[in-house]
């Protein structure tokens, strides 16, 4: 369940950024300028995703499938991997040395994240 949720979330974020990087630029500028658009976006999308992912991770911790982690921080860490990927590729136009496809990048992010939270 959780690997699928992580894949869908990461793919959707990357797909949206690839379709129109203008939104990411606008959001960064609005945050830097303290514009109301930033708060609106944060409340309407970021908080919703954070809370959803936090609940999913918390359930896996409670079930004993994940080691004890702070669900909110774990959610932010996963989302952080995706956002960094988007910033480097879509905003700065850079490619990593291996230049993975978006699908491969998503699979690697999900694998790295899950191997970090799973119980040994």
Image: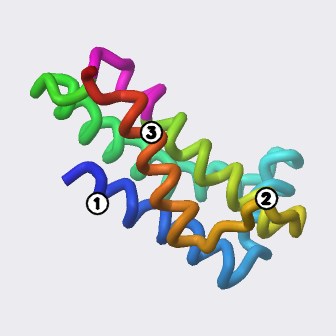
Crowd rating for badge 3 (residues with CA inside 10 Å; few <14, some 14–19, many 20+) = some
In this picture, residue 115 sits left or right of residue 66 = right
Give the residue furthest to the left.
63
Reading the chain from its start, which is encountered first: label 3 or label 1?
1
The residue depicted at 19 percent of the width and 54 percent of the height is 1
Reading the chain from its start, which is encountered first: label 3 or label 2?
2
When asked about the image quadrant of residue 88, the answer is bottom right
When asked about the image quadrant of residue 55, the answer is top left
Residue of label 1 = 4
Regarding mark 3 in the picture, which secondary structure is present there? helix
Regarding mark 1 in the picture, which secondary structure is present there? helix
The residue depicted at 25 percent of the width and 27 percent of the height is 66
Residue of label 2 = 96
Q: What whole-number distance in Å separates the C-alpha atoms at marks 3 and 2? A: 19 Å
Please tell me whether residue 45 is drawn above or below residue 63 in the rendered image. Answer: below
The residue depicted at 38 percent of the width and 66 percent of the height is 8
Residue 65 pos. (x, y %): 17, 29
Reading the chain from its start, which is encountered first: label 2 or label 1?
1
Q: What whole-number distance in Å separates the C-alpha atoms at marks 3 and 1? A: 13 Å
35 magenta-colored: no
Please tell me whether residue 107 is drawn above or below residue 33 in the rendered image. Answer: below
Magenta range: 67-74
68 magenta-colored: yes
Give the residue furthest to the front.
98
Q: What whole-number distance in Å separates the C-alpha atoms at marks 2 and 1? A: 25 Å
Residue of label 3 = 113
Residue 68 pos. (x, y %): 29, 15
In this picture, residue 114 sits left or right of residue 27 = left
Residue 35 pos. (x, y %): 79, 52
In this picture, residue 16 sits left or right of residue 119 = right
């Amino acid at each position: 369940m959780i690997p699928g949720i992580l894949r869908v979330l990461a793919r959707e974020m990357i797909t949206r950024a690839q379709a129109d990087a203008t939104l990411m630029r606008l959001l960064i500028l609005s945050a830097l300028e303290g514009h109301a658009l930033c708060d609106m976006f944060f409340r309407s999308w970021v908080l919703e995703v954070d809370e959803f992912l936090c609940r999913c991770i918390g359930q896996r911790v409670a079930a004993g499938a994940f080691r004890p982690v702070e669900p909110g921080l774990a959610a932010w860490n996963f989302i952080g991997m995706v956002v960094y990927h988007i910033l480097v590729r879509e905003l700065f136009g850079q490619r990593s040395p291996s230049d993975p496809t978006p699908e491969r990048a998503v699979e690697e992010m999900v694998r790295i994240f899950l191997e970090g939270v799973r119980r040994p």
